[in-house]
Amino acid sequence: MFRILFILIIVVSAIEIAIFVSLGNAFNVWIVLFGIILTGLAGAFLAKQQGLGTLNRARFEMSNSRVPTEEIFDGIAILVGAVLLFTPGFLTDTIGFLLLIPPTRRPAKQWAKKTVQNMVKSGKITVFRR
């Protein structure tokens, strides 16, 4: 797992550098820097908005004695999206925005749910119940 993550970080970094160089040649370096700052600010605003909405929905579910399962997965996707938006780069920003927008977040949530369910079934994750 560590090797895959290490290779993924190197590949994504190389792609980001290639995108920076391409955009820097096509436009102006200052425009590229402005784009990086703008996506970071827009991402922070969107992450805060989506995070607070998810938190309020989770509180509502818990006040009605229900487990906020959907909201937990939404929160994880929002957290990952926000982290990706704070890393400089347009590829990571694109993925981050996709995780922050509810309709495009849905496939990632479905994948995460299946992964967790498979890990529970295989015994990699233990769930304790009363």
Image (cartoon, rainbow, N blue to C red):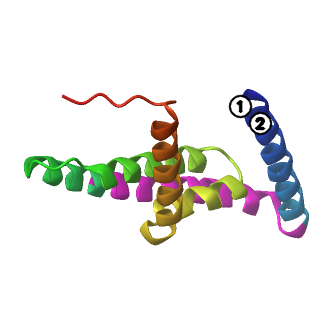
Where is residue 68 shown, x and y percent of the image?
A: 25, 49
CB atoms of marks 2 and 1 within 8 Å: yes
Between 60 and 1, the one nearer to me in the picture: 1
Residue found 68% across the figure and 47% down from its top: 88
Q: Is 38 situated above or below 79?
A: below
Quadrant of image for the C terminus:
top left
Q: Which residue is mark 1?
A: 1
Q: Is 125 situated above or below 17?
A: above
Between 26 and 44, the one nearer to me in the picture: 44
User: Which range is magenta?
Assistant: 26-52
Residue found 73% across the figure and 35% down from its top: 5
Residue found 71% across the figure and 57% down from its top: 91
Where is residue 14 shown, x and y percent of the image?
A: 86, 46
- Is residue 6 in the magenta section? no
Q: Is residue 128 left or right of residue 114?
A: left
Where is residue 102 shown, x and y percent of the image?
A: 42, 67
The amino acid sitting under disc 1 is Met
Where is residue 89 shown, x and y percent of the image?
A: 71, 52
Q: Is residue 109 left or right of residue 4?
A: left
Magenta part mainly helix, strand or loop? helix
Quadrant of image for the N terminus:
top right
Q: Determine crowd level at label 2: few under 14, some 14-19, many 20+ residues with C-alpha closer than 10 A.
A: few
Q: Is residue 5 left or right of residue 73?
A: right
Q: Hey, which quadrant is residue 34 in on the image?
A: bottom right
Between 10 and 124, the one nearer to me in the picture: 124
- Is residue 38 in the magenta section? yes
Residue found 80% across the figure and 51% down from its top: 16
Is label 2 in a helix, a strand or a loop? helix
Residue 17 is labelled as: none
Q: Which residue is mark 2?
A: 4
The Cα atoms of the two marked residues, 2 and 1, are separated by: 5 Å
Between 115 and 62, the one nearer to me in the picture: 115
